[in-house]
Amino acid sequence: MNLHGSPFEDGIETYLPRGVDHLGFIEAKLRDLRGFATLAHELIQNADDAKTNAKVISFDVCDDAFIVDNDGKFSDCGEMEERICPWKNDPTIAHACDFHRFRTVASRDKREEEGTTGAFGIGFIAVYQITDHPEVISGGRHWILYDENPENKRIHVCKGCNRCQRSELPG
């Protein structure tokens, strides 16, 4: 707005970017998601929201890892190179697949899908109290998060390793 009132008086519109400090947002939300009970609750809720509705979930605390395993599977549109999930524009589905949801922190997309518990897209942030680089393995995909990187390099897509090639993994 100029000093005399209307922001459009001179006929020229000016816009500036406004963003969110990604790590600052995660840090602020993590303050609300502290404790192992909260962590377990959020991970159980995520497993419950999986398309196949996970029936079994296990927590394995190892010397070098905390492994959460379940028999659920992320829904996958198969178009990960697209920024917007094509399912959102499909009237028979009308929401993003789980992998696209995961790519956008706080997407709130689950609230559009019937039968899901999560609503805001922030529960997974609870894992940052135990690791800086969480990994997701589901449906033949293995993603490793590097949130300190620029936005276009925060998810490392593993091309194949011992962990993501285990035959007992879901999907």
Image (cartoon, rainbow, N blue to C red):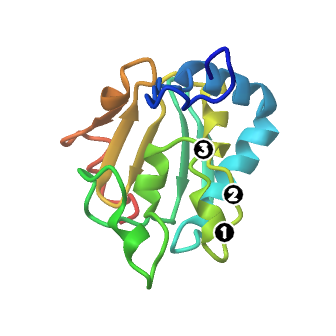
Circle 3 sits in a helix, a strand or a loop, which is it? loop
| For discs 1 and 3, the disc positioned in front in the rendered view | 3
Nearest the viewer among 43 and 153 is 153
Q: Residue 78 appears at what percent x and percent y?
A: 26, 64
Mark toward the start of the polypeptide (2 vs 3): 3
Task: Tell me: 66 left or right of 13.
Answer: right
Q: Residues within 10 Å of mark 3 (few under 14, many from 20)?
A: some
Query: What residue did someone put label 3 on?
Result: 106
Nearest the viewer among 41 and 28 is 28
**Amino acid, disc 2:** Ala
Q: Residue 34 appears at what percent x and percent y?
A: 78, 29
**Amino acid, disc 3:** Ala
Circle 2 sits in a helix, a strand or a loop, which is it? loop
**Rendered image quadrant of residue 157:** top left
> What numbered label is drawn on residue 52?
none
**Amino acid, disc 1:** Thr
Compared with 50, 147 (above or below) is above
> What numbered label is drawn on residue 119?
2
What residue sits 54% from the left and 66% below the top? Answer: 50
> What numbered label is drawn on residue 116?
1
Compared with 30, 86 (above or below) is below
Looking at the image, do the residues carrying marks 2 and 1 touch, with CB atoms under 8 Å apart? yes
Mark toward the start of the polypeptide (1 vs 3): 3
Q: Quadrant of the N terminus?
A: top right
Looking at the image, do the residues carrying marks 1 and 3 touch, with CB atoms under 8 Å apart? no
